[in-house]
Image: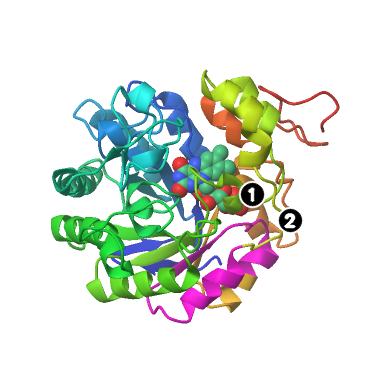
Amino acid sequence: MFSPGRIGPLTLRNRILKAATYEGLSHGSRVTRDLVDFHRAYAAGGVGMTTVAYCAVAPDGRTSPHQILWTDEAMPGLRVLTDTIHAEGAAVSAQIGHAGPVADPRGNKRPALSPSTRFPNIAGGISRRATRADIERVTVQHAAAAVRAIEAGFDAIEVHLGHSYLASAFLSPKINHRRDEYGGSLENRAKVGRGILRAVRDAVGSRIAILTKLNMSDGVRGGITLEEAIQTARWIEADGTVDAFEMTGGSSLLNPMYLFRGGAPVEEFVDVMPQPMKTVMRIGGKKFIREYPYQDAFLLDHARQVRREIALPMVLLGGITDRASMDLAMCEGFEFVAMGRALLCEPDLVNRIAADAATPSLCIHCNRCMPTNFVGTHCPVIHDGSSRSVTWGTPAGYA
Ligand SMILES: Cc1cc2nc3c(=O)[nH]c(=O)nc-3n(C[C@H](O)[C@H](O)[C@H](O)COP(=O)(O)O)c2cc1C
């Protein structure tokens, strides 16, 4: 775990990545001091690489109107962020993507793009069916974002092909009902994702490491299957367009908790969501935010099947919380692990595990961190013996 590892042109000091957890700390599409401090904590806390979550490649691809865009105005702040992380000895990756039907049409003041209009977007409205010109535009915007990431000092980019964001929505037969060259067969449905990766690789070569976060399952009947995901990963590997895979699952549009497992914080979502989503969540939240039992390394069963078919480095994600789950990942042939909630809970957990392999994680998988992205993502739970204080939403007696 604590030996250097390579992803394409990049060597990391260890095998542990901070997974993208949308921070809710950018403002006016620019970096804030809080965002820099957020990532500094993980870098100082020992991760090999932290991931700046979801930087949209286009205004209509944002899930929140304040999300980082790759504009001239954002560049100085992004440079401060990457310099800060490097000063702590860690590398830094930018997650790039277009949210498609998961984008916020009200906040963006633009319709959400989707493979088909037949499927409601995240706001419950009708999406605009992406035209060929839209697909070409978004593809070029990914390449431009990757170039900008190099200019801003990032070591890696993580191209988002999961969670029903645009490229993943095209892959999903549940959402993609097209009859043209982008719909129907898996080969057609994979064209948008593969085309984006091709454009990114052509634009950056090996000047920056390229990872992709790819869905293994949408967690819904009729969605992406593991077999299809394996075939897609094989094609991507043969295309030579990525340096590592991070396999994921679930759908921000159809089944968000499939990706998380653990508690379903419906009331906390109702508290912080803007209208009309607040009312929608109050009425339908229990159905939408379905609860799944948590277990460590909960994506391993699926991910090891991809591992068998892929030679490139792979990152195991989902329920990595302690040295035992990290060692399990290494034994199963993964070169890296990514940690989300356990690090939100304790940003210095990696250093503490390095010092004492028996260090347990304090994360209880209650998922109350999820709705905090509306106010600045953090773990709102007080743990006995910790100096952490509650800044939002901890129910009385919850400690
Ligand atoms: C608050 C929060 C925000 C997240 N935001 C993102 C995101 O912007 N992009 C993404 O790909 N995944 C996002 N995720 C998912 C995580 O990257 C990760 O896949 C998930 O939390 C499972 O890993 P874990 O068990 O280590 O937490 C988010 C997770 C949380 C808890």
Amino acid identity at mark 1? Leu
Looking at this rendering, what residue extends furthest in the right direction? 397
Residue 342 in the figure: left or right of residue 139: right
Q: Residue at x 25, y 56 (%)?
A: 192
Would you call the spot at circle 2 few (<14 residues within 10 Å), some (14-19), or many (20 or more)?
some
Residue 349 is tagged as 1
Residue 121: x percent and y percent?
41, 37
Q: Residue at x 37, y 51 (%)?
A: 169
In the image, 345 versus 24, the foreground residue is: 24
Residue 117 visible in image? yes
With respect to residue 104, does 306 lie above or below?
below
Instruction: Report if the CB atoms under discs 1 and 2 are less than 8 Å apart.
Output: yes
Residue 32: x percent and y percent?
39, 25
Q: Quadrant of the N terminus?
A: bottom right
Residue 78: x percent and y percent?
31, 34
Q: Where are the magenta residues, as a range?
A: 299-327
With respect to residue 163, does 70 lie above or below?
above
Residue 265 in the figure: left or right of residue 384: left
Amino acid identity at mark 2? Thr
In the image, 183 versus 190, the foreground residue is: 183
Q: Residue at x 23, y 55 (%)?
A: 196
Colour mapping used in the image: rainbow
Q: Earlier in the sequence, mark 1 or mark 2?
A: 1
Disc 2 Cβ-to-ligand 1 distance below 8 Å: no
Residue 210 is tagged as none
**Which residue does the numbered mark 2 point to in the structure image?**
359
